[in-house]
Amino acid sequence: MKHRILFGLILAPLAPAWAQDPQPTIPDTIVSATRVPTPQDRIPAATTLITRQDIEDYGYVTLADALAAVPGFRLVQAGGPGQQASGFVRGTNSRHVLVLRDGVPLNDSSEPNGAFNFGNELLGDVERIEVVRGPVSAVYGTAAIGGVVNLITRQAPRDRTFAPYGEVAGGTQRTARGYVGAGGTVGNFDYGITGQALSTEGYNVIAPRITTNQGERDGLRAAAMTARMGVTIGETTPEAAIGQTRIDGLLRWRENTAGLDNVPNDDPNYTGQDRNWFGFLRSRTDLAGGAWTTGFRVSGSHDRRRYTNLPDSLSQSTADDLYNGERRGIAWDNTLRLPSAEGIFTDAVLTFGSGWDREQVESGAGSPFFRTTVDARSSSGYGYVGAQARFFGRLDVTAAARLDDTEDYGSQTSWRLGAVLELPEIGSRIRASGGTAFKAPSLYQRFGQIGSFFRGNPNLQAETSESWEVGWETDIGRYATLSALYFDNRISNLINFDSTFTTLENIDRARIRGGEFAVTLRPADWASVTGSWTVLEARDVETDTPLPRRPRNVASLTARIAPEVGWFGVPRSRFVIAPEILYVGPSPEGAFARYEDNGNALPTAGKNPDGWLFNLTASLPVTAQLTAFVEVRNIGNTRYEPANAFVVPGRSAVVGMRGAF
């Protein structure tokens, strides 16, 4: 995995000794941080890029799999496959991370807090995943307090009319999965389509220590279909006032059906269904000889979640809960490339634009006496501006500001400023940035009702944050990269229940600070090892207590060992071995979220023990087009509890074949 963990302070005194034998490399580019494709080592933000090769080499199937080793990213799955997997980025709440598909928001409006389920998304149609940690509201608006995850769909090859690809695999837990797709370019037209599916019997994820545990497995059936088409018209020349126009669209359907449990009891008749439709149509036109690119986008999504339960011998509980959420959006985006002033600044780019978004929720859940309902909608408009440039050949500066104005809770201004100073003499980079971000109150928080005793608060304000980070990154020739980063985040106006539990108020504050440290070793061109460690202190300022499910220490160790092999006329290619070790330290758990062995909820806060996972994937080329692979997850069969009373899935193994033709 290409972790480029930005920032660091403690390595500076040693840097000159390491900066020997510098080797030029082609840097990865990131779009999500500033809306402009920018080399990763010139972005003043902590970023991680997960490529298609990483997804295949490490055997990542879901988005939760792919993000588990990202520094500063803590994934907590409360249940089996497909059940809620929450992401805590740098200690912020799970509702404080924004997830995008090709730059368009995906978060489900009907989720009461606006949190994203990272366990739902399969990756067969994903080309790359860009993760930006830190405040990004100045670029994308609400929810980007902790960071942004952008899923970028597979692109059509420009040099082929038909390029098929696919994968099929099966293994333990009666698991069967696969995807098939194709893409290509015919004249000015290009296309891509991918279908994917997963079926597994799953695991019993109720902790074995719980005496009411019946050993019932919670399975998952998941499927998705993605279609993308585009057309390119005209040509951009220096003299052309109106140049090339690109029009493309995407339509995606996903549906998952998963078994659920009523903690601490197994419940074989409890099932959840999660369906999502998502799509967009956009244009992009070059003006003024390509100096100005302007584009329009319309987008929409619909989420439908239904949870049903029937009485059985283990539980007399019943449920028929339905959540419907919709998003609609219109956007106008512009990129203006400014002339360079040689010797002073180059690569100067100005971005600006505006847009309109609308959310709608209709939901009903719970028993007749404790029924939670929401029937609400809200619209908002926004405008943004950003700028970036490289000064004196070594200082990259970026700035962004955005104004969001809503129809019912006021306006919110966000900003971000950062810089990267390159020190080629010692093979190092100094980075620093700061900014503000916000999370708008959800429609449930403003307009939800529970029976006759709870009403949402339409006067809620946005949750806001102020944060900064600074650090150092050093290359030891081509053999190693070391980095460290310190970040500090203060969050205000956090939404919580009032003292009578009859409504919600902006009453909490949090202080989060920590460090991200990493080392990547490259002893040969066919081997690399990356170790990362995140240390975190996240506390509720009002009560001076640790925030739940934020462990102080999280670490990972990943490697890619890929010697060349070849036989029986097969061209020499890479035999890839990719181990991954994940460690999570003891994590705080809140009151009534902890359970005794007999299943009784505890009224006091406590800690979940630490735990680790060891995953291993190996890929062997069979022909020039086909690769066989084996994936073994949780080799040690550890069953620690990331969320109290829920354990991680047990040992599993899958074998399969992958091809690109």
Image (tube, rainbow, N blue to C red):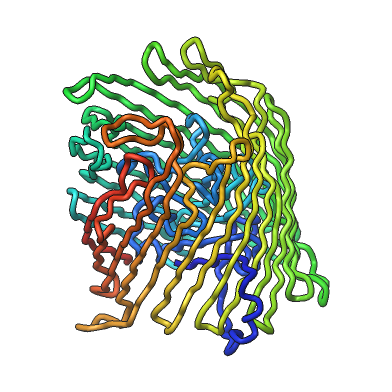
Q: Residue at x 64, y 30 (%)?
A: 507
- Splitting the image into 4 quarters, where does residue 559 fall? bottom left
Q: Decide if residue 280 is in sight here.
A: no
Q: Residue at x 40, y 43 (%)?
A: 85
134 in relation to 366, above or below: below
Q: Which residue is more in the foreground, 229 or 265?
A: 265
Question: Where 223 sits versus 537, above or below?
Answer: above
Direction bottom: furthest residue: 21
Q: On the picture, is 199 further left or further right than 39?
A: left
Question: Residue 267's x, y, as percent?
Answer: 24, 29
| Percent x, y of residue 274 | 37, 34
Q: Position of residue 263 (x, y in %)?
A: 31, 32
**In which quadrant of the rendered image does the C terminus lie?**
bottom left
Query: Which quarter of the figure has residue 17?
Result: bottom right
The front one of 171 and 250 is 171
Q: What is the count of numbered marks?
A: 0
Image quarter of the N terminus: bottom left
Q: Residue at x 52, y 35 (%)?
A: 114
Q: In front: 586, or 8?
A: 586
On the image, which quarter does residue 327 sit in?
A: top right
- Residue at image point 24% right, 67% down: 628
| Residue 362 in sight here | yes
Q: Whole-percent x and y of residue 299?
A: 55, 39
